[in-house]
Image (cartoon, rainbow, N blue to C red):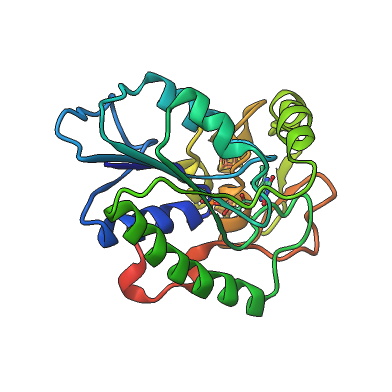
Amino acid sequence: MIFYFSGTGNSAWAARQLANLTEDEAYNIISLKELPDIGNAKQIGFVFPVYAWGAPEVMVDFAKKLPQPPVFTFGVCTCGGDAGLTMKQFSKWYSLSSSYSLVMPNNYIIGSDTDDKGVILQKITAARVELEQIAQEIHRQEQVYRVHEGGLAGVKSHLANLGFNKFARSAKPFFTEDSCNGCGLCARNCPAHAISLRDGKPIWAAQCYQCLRCINECPQRAIQYGKSTAGRHRYTIWAYLPQDEQF
Ligand SMILES: Cc1cc2nc3c(=O)[nH]c(=O)nc-3n(C[C@H](O)[C@H](O)[C@H](O)COP(=O)(O)O)c2cc1C
Ligand code: SF4
Ligand code: SF4
């Protein structure tokens, strides 16, 4: 059983690919109504994005509640570049036999613009190759730690991550421009249920997961976050996948 959380699709896609390659099933933790029965699981996996060199809190909370049967376990974090100590910290909450980072296109458009189209395509192509290798290693139940931690990993995963979860998850800076047509997609798709429609226009709760799905996937590109996102591109993996990999 492979459990995933995803904002803009990188981790959802990676989880599905791994499930196909290892003849397993991938489950979106946001769609689960209750804790799943893992009694018959032959392996347990987690796939999620890196947020400020750490695992998303929603994923950690899920893992903390999940029983730990004596089966092979693995975690894959998807990131734009550096994962820091994400997987070592996650392993404290749920013991992992193997840990990986998978470099994928960057979706954090609050911090910087998206990767160029060429880089996006190159990262997805490289990720396909890496996922094949990860799947083979999982199949052989090899214990592997292949995580690109990057520099100053300890400082980033402790101090910067603490700062992110305490201060940078405010949803208040989100606003819509006049091009919003009130379609409601952002509200329907928000994994934190932090968006509602008032007078046909979205309003945000005080805090959210900061997954950036709403701002990246608005069909009108009508959402901004403070002053930092105007003029920047938007990213979602679904724009780059063939038809048979859409879901
Ligand atoms: C709030 C936030 C923080 C991020 N922090 C990092 C980071 O510390 N290191 C990194 O390499 N990528 C970082 N990213 C980029 C994402 O980890 C990366 O694009 C990921 O593959 C997105 O996965 P998803 O499409 O499944 O949501 C961050 C993205 C977001 C939204
Ligand atoms: S998805 Fe975009 S256009 Fe649709 S309601 Fe949300 S902000 Fe408006
Ligand atoms: S409000 Fe936007 S960024 Fe925050 S959790 Fe919902 S979809 Fe993600």
Residue 129, percent across and down? 45, 71
Residue reaching furthest to the bottom: 118
Residue 144, percent across and down? 45, 48
Instruction: Say if residue 199 shows up in the picture.
Output: no
The residue that appears at 38% across and 66% down in the rendered structure is 132
The residue that appears at 40% across and 58% down in the rendered structure is 134
- Asked whether, in this view, residue 111 is left or right of residue 15, the answer is right
163 above or below 126? Answer: above
The residue that appears at 43% across and 21% down in the rendered structure is 64
Residue 232, percent across and down? 76, 63
- Asked whether, in this view, residue 214 is left or right of residue 128, the answer is right
Residue reaching furthest to the right: 227
Q: How many marks?
A: 0
Location of residue 153 (image quadrant): top right
Q: Please name whichever residue, 148 or 227, is drawn nearer the observer in this view of the structure.
A: 148
Q: In the rendered view of the protein, which quadrant contains the N terminus? A: top left
Residue reaching furthest to the left: 40
13 above or below 122? Answer: above
Instruction: Say if residue 168 shows up in the picture.
Output: yes
The residue that appears at 26% across and 26% down in the rendered structure is 69
Q: In the rendered view of the protein, which quadrant contains the C terminus? A: bottom left
Residue 180, percent across and down? 63, 54
